[in-house]
């Protein structure tokens, strides 16, 4: 949503820090759970960058969930798959989760965290083994 990150930009598999992983997973789950209830998750300055707070406004979350729901059904849960970390430039970690929705679609929920541990990106897209 906010950053365009790919393997070409120097991202490599990384060791998951259990505490950071839990923060990324919980934040991802909260956002999608609130959206599935017809609500939204109001991000705070402690959790997300200013750009993410602005970018994931109430209207954006509600509108985008309607699209997601139309394609994949209601959200159920996310399952951690891997973390990637960039090797150059500003430090970001990409947490990749398999998204489980009502359909059997193979969905990726990608949460990007910056060096301060704040959400800096959030994507939902078809799963690909490589980013």
Image: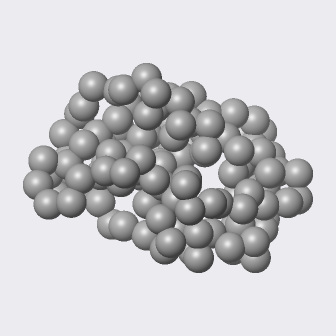
Numbered marks: total: 0
In which quarter of the view is residue 61 placed?
bottom right
Q: Residue at x 56, y 62 (%)?
A: 45
Residue 91 or residue 75, whichever sits in front: 91
In the rendered image, residue 67, in percent from the top left (x then y), is placed at: 72, 65
Residue at horizontal 29 percent and vertical 60 percent from the top? 5
Judged left or right of residue 5, residue 63 is right
Q: Please identify the quarter of the rendering in which residue 26 is found.
A: top right
Residue 60 against residue 78 in the figure, above or below: below
Q: Position of residue 68 (x, y in %)?
A: 70, 58
Percent across and percent down for residue 102 are 77, 39
Q: Residue at x 37, y 51 (%)?
A: 116
Identify the residue shown where x is 69% and y is 51%: 31
Q: Please indicate whether residue 5 sits to the left or right of residue 18 in the image.
A: left
Up/down of 86 relative to 18, above or below = below
Residue 123 makes an appearance in the image: no
Q: How is the image coloured?
A: one colour
* Residue 28 position within the rendered picture, expressed as x and y whole percent measured from the top left: 60, 45
Query: Residue 11 or 99: which is nearer the viewer?
Result: 11
Is residue 12 visible from the viewing direction of this image?
Answer: yes
Relative vertical location of residue 118 with respect to residue 3 in this rendering, above or below: above
Judge by depth and name the residue closer to the eye, 118 or 33. Answer: 118
């Amino acid at each position: 949503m906010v950053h365009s990150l790919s393997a070409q930009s120097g991202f490599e598999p990384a060791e998951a820090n259990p505490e950071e992983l839990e923060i990324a997973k919980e934040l991802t789950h909260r956002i999608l759970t609130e959206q599935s209830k017809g609500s939204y998750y109001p991000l705070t300055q402690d959790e997300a960058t200013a750009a993410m707070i602005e970018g994931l406004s109430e209207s954006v979350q509600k509108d985008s969930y309607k699209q997601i729901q139309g394609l994949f059904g209601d959200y159920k849960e996310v399952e951690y798959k891997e973390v990637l970390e960039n090797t150059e430039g500003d430090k970001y970690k990409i947490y990749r989760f398999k998204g489980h929705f009502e359909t059997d679609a193979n969905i990726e929920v990608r949460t990007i965290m910056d060096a301060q541990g704040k959400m800096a990106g959030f994507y939902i897209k078809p799963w690909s083994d490589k980013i």
